[in-house]
Amino acid sequence: MDIPKFEEFISQYPIYEYRLLDVQELSVHQRVRIICEKECERYNSTWACPPGVGTLKECEDRIRSYTQAIFFSSVAEVSDILNMEEMLETRSAHEELTTQVGQYLEDEGYEIFILSTESCDICRDCTFKEGKPCRYPEKMHPCLESHGVVANEIVEREAMEYQLGGNTILWFSMVLFR
């Protein structure tokens, strides 16, 4: 990757921090999938979440088939950090930013795979429950956790910010590429 060219590109966007990662250094954890199954209402309801994304082994193999990743964050401001609806409304700007980073890498000739925030909300009703294929697989970004990736583990290892305090939110994404 041409780092100066990428930094010129990324400086045009509201990316708070980013790190270039060696995919082989990423950890995939079963415990995250257990939390998905036990605590997340999106489990078993969308192609962006387990079990729709495949087994943990399939997800790990998918991740490991790439050599590098850009892991990055963006900041959103809300009037009340406890207002979940307002907080989730800020996610779409981060998802668009994630798509733009992915598009840049594709334009540079890389094959990409995107893992992002939460779960996909492109369609009002996901086709997963109907047993039909995803309508927009090229637009859907599975969540990091669906693949067993723990964002705060990467944040700690890479000395990045995880919380800024006040009424700010940090969203995280990862674009894997080869």
Image (cartoon, grey):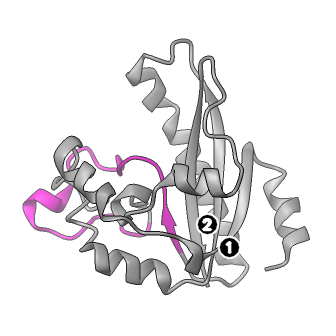
Which labelled disc corresponds to residue 7? none
Q: Amino acid at mark 2?
A: Gly
Q: Residues within 10 Å of mark 1 (few under 14, many from 20)?
A: many
In this rendering, would 118 be left or right of 19?
left
Image spot of residue 168 (x, y percent): 61, 25
Q: Is residue 110 visible?
A: yes
Q: Is disc 2 in contact with disc 1, using a CB cutoff of under 8 Å?
A: yes
Q: Quadrant of residue 68?
A: bottom right
What residue sits 82% from the left and 67% below the top? 6
Does the stretch in magenta take in 121? yes
Q: Residues within 10 Å of mark 2 (few under 14, many from 20)?
A: many
Q: Quadrant of the N terminus?
A: bottom right
Image spot of residue 99 (x, y percent): 57, 58
Camera-nearest residue between 8 and 135:
8
* Residue named by callout 1: 105
* Secondary element at image label 1: helix
Residue 67 against residue 74 in the figure, above or below: below
Q: Quadrant of residue 28?
A: bottom left
Image spot of residue 166 (x, y percent): 63, 17
Type of secondary structure dominating the magenta stretch: loop
Camera-nearest residue between 66 and 141:
66
What residue sits 35% from the left and 75% below the top? 59
Region rendered in magenta: 113-138
* Residue named by callout 2: 102
Q: Amino acid at mark 1?
A: Leu
What residue sits 69% from the left and 57% below the top? 158
Residue 136 against residue 88 in the figure, above or below: below
From mark 2 to mark 1, how far is it between C-alphas? 5 Å
In this rendering, would 139 be left or right of 71?
left
Residue 168 against residue 134 in the figure, above or below: above
